[in-house]
Amino acid sequence: MNAALPAPNLDALRATFPILASEAYGKPLVYLDNAATTQKPRAVIEAIEHYYLHTNSNVHRGAHYLGDLATAALEDAREKVAAFLNARREEVIWTRGTTEGINLVAHSFGGSQLKAGDEVLISSLEHHANIVPWQQVCARTGATLRVIPLAADASLDLSNLDALINERTRIVAVVHVSNALGVINPVAEIIRRARAVGATVLLDAAQAVAHFPVDVQALDCDFLVFSGHKLFGPTGIGVLYGRQALLETMPPYQTGGEMIETVTFEASTWNQLPYKFEAGTPHIAGAVGLGAAIDWLNAQDRQAFLAHEEDLRDYVTERARAFPGLRIIGDTPSKVATLSFLLDGAHPNDVGTLLDQQGVAVRTGHHCTMPLMNLLGIPGTVRASFAPYNRRDDIDRLFTALEKAAKFL
């Protein structure tokens, strides 16, 4: 097997993640469930703690010192997200996560723009969160939902893209990186085709932002969504990026609180962007934590991270191909460091349970992609997903545990 490539100082990196020093069943934890949520560096944990110890207040309308501090912290985090995505601060909307961001766009933009005869295009690799909202909006407006099919290797089949994206296509909503399989979709090609027919594009970047830089200007997308907890930040906070011109035309998704400008018993008017889409008290500590996660990530050598993750991807794929009875699902060259697989004669849940008993944390099931699993003719998979703090010896531990599980099963 190939030797490990030069990598970040993994001991130093791992030391910044307190949970990685914990043990499961008397063994060091092997955490391979990063596609579900990443672990948090100490800097993020301490930023959240500092907020609650020293800054906690509601934002924007307080006439006191703590209110000013909390508002500054929230808006500073927004500025960090904007720079991270190469967007304007007015184009960064706080959400609870990717799911809420997609629902906001589907119901506000889609609900106000779509009509009978229009088409919305998604892909076969979508998470339920990028399927169900569009189904609902299409049912309400009379639009038609269409799907980019799968190729034999479980990547997207774009051979008929010109027909799929046509003069009736109004919205294209696709995932950048598949959560279930790790496949990186050719979003640049899809966006170029959408632009040619004047369609609006939403990208689900939940699985992309932690692996490689994402620039909304270079991508030329209209909307982009991601969740903080998949970017080394806290749960319950997410981001919707939207082109300012589009956000200005969209009706509010929820009402009340900071999104209000004026209210009478007869009518109300809305606040300016980005607050127009931020009803109620935001998750202030979550935004602070996400800002700290971006600071932490910006301080790292992302090229070294990417090279290290590519080495992990190649190594785990090599080990998997050599493992008797193991079938890789989505064995394509364009992937992040994710291994989705089945063992002959074993249910994924049984495999996951046996791995867990040996201190190896993976995820099993349909991964919120039931239509994809139906297309593949399988009930689900075992998924091992990697982050920069993982090592080759985590992969060795995975396959040692798999050998024991296979013998037991």
Image: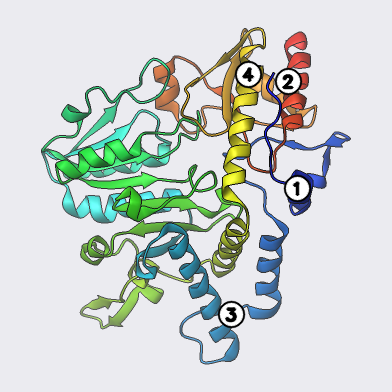
- The residue singled out by tag 1 in the image is 14
Discs 1/3, front: 1
Residue type, mark 4 in image: Glu
Image quadrant of residue 157? top left
Residue type, mark 2 in image: Phe
Distance CA(mark 2)–CA(mark 3):
49 Å
The disc placed on residue 57 is 3
Residue 363 visible, this orientation: no
Quadrant for the C terminus, please: top right
Distance CA(mark 4)–CA(mark 2):
11 Å
> x, y (%) of residue 347?
62, 16
Residue at the location (82% across, 46% down)?
Answer: 21
Residue at the location (23% across, 60% down)?
Answer: 246
- The residue singled out by tag 4 in the image is 318
Image quadrant of residue 26? top right
Q: Residues within 10 Å of mark 4 (few under 14, many from 20)?
A: few
Residue extending furthest toward the right: 26
Task: Compare marks 4 and 3 and give the one earlier in the sequence.
Answer: 3
Residue type, mark 1 in image: Arg
Circle 2 sits in a helix, a strand or a loop, which is it? helix
- Side (left or right) of 287 relative to 201: right
Residue at the location (33% across, 77% down)?
Answer: 260
> x, y (%) of residue 226?
46, 51
- The residue singled out by tag 2 in the image is 399
Distance CA(mark 1)–CA(mark 3):
33 Å
Circle 4 sits in a helix, a strand or a loop, which is it? helix
Task: Compare marks 1 and 3 and give the one earlier in the sequence.
Answer: 1
